[in-house]
Image (spheres, rainbow, N blue to C red):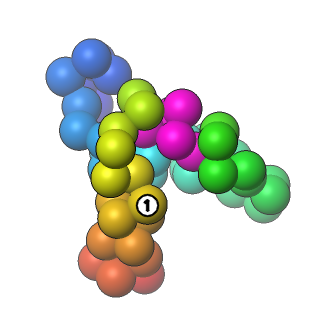
Amino acid sequence: MPSKKNCGSKALILDYFLANIGKVLEARAIQKASGYATEWACRIRELRNEEG
């Protein structure tokens, strides 16, 4: 995977989810993992719809 600097927010969130399987994640932590993307919640919904 490319360096985090070159990744989109969706890829960053997916990496964060995969690194924290089985843990309860707070919204602020997910937002931070996305690189503070303004549409981070939309990226989560997209991941849920696309990746299951």
The residue shown at (34%, 44%) is 38
Taking the view exactly as shown, the residue that stands out farthest to the front is: 38
SS for dot 1: helix
Count how many numbered circles sit on residues in the image. 1
Identify the residue shown where x is 24% and y is 31%: 7
Quadrant occupied by the C terminus: bottom left
User: In this view of the protein, can residue 47 be seen by the observer?
Assistant: no
Where residue 40 sits in the image (x, y, percent)? Answer: 39, 51
| Amino acid marked by disc 1 | Ala
Q: Residue at (65%, 39%) from the top-left corner?
A: 29
Q: In front: 13, or 3?
A: 13
Q: Can residue 26 be seen in this view?
A: yes
Task: Quadrant for residue 24, please give it.
Answer: bottom right
Q: Which residue is more in the foreground, 2 or 13?
A: 13
Q: Nearer the viewer, residue 42 or 21?
A: 42
In the image, is 49 to the left or to the right of 18? left
As displayed, is residue 8 above or below residue 50?
Answer: above
Image: magenta residue range: 30-34
Residue 25: x and y in percent read 73, 52
Q: Residue at x 34, y 60 (%)?
A: 43
- Left or right, 4 with respect to 24, comes to left
Percent across and percent down for residue 31 are 52, 41
Residue matched to label 1: 41
Task: State the quadrant of the N terminus.
Answer: top left
In this rendering, is residue 33 above or below 3? below
- Local packing at callout 1 (Cα closer than 10 Å; few below 14, some 14-19, many 20+) is some
Dominant secondary structure (helix, strand or loop) of the stretch shown in magenta: helix
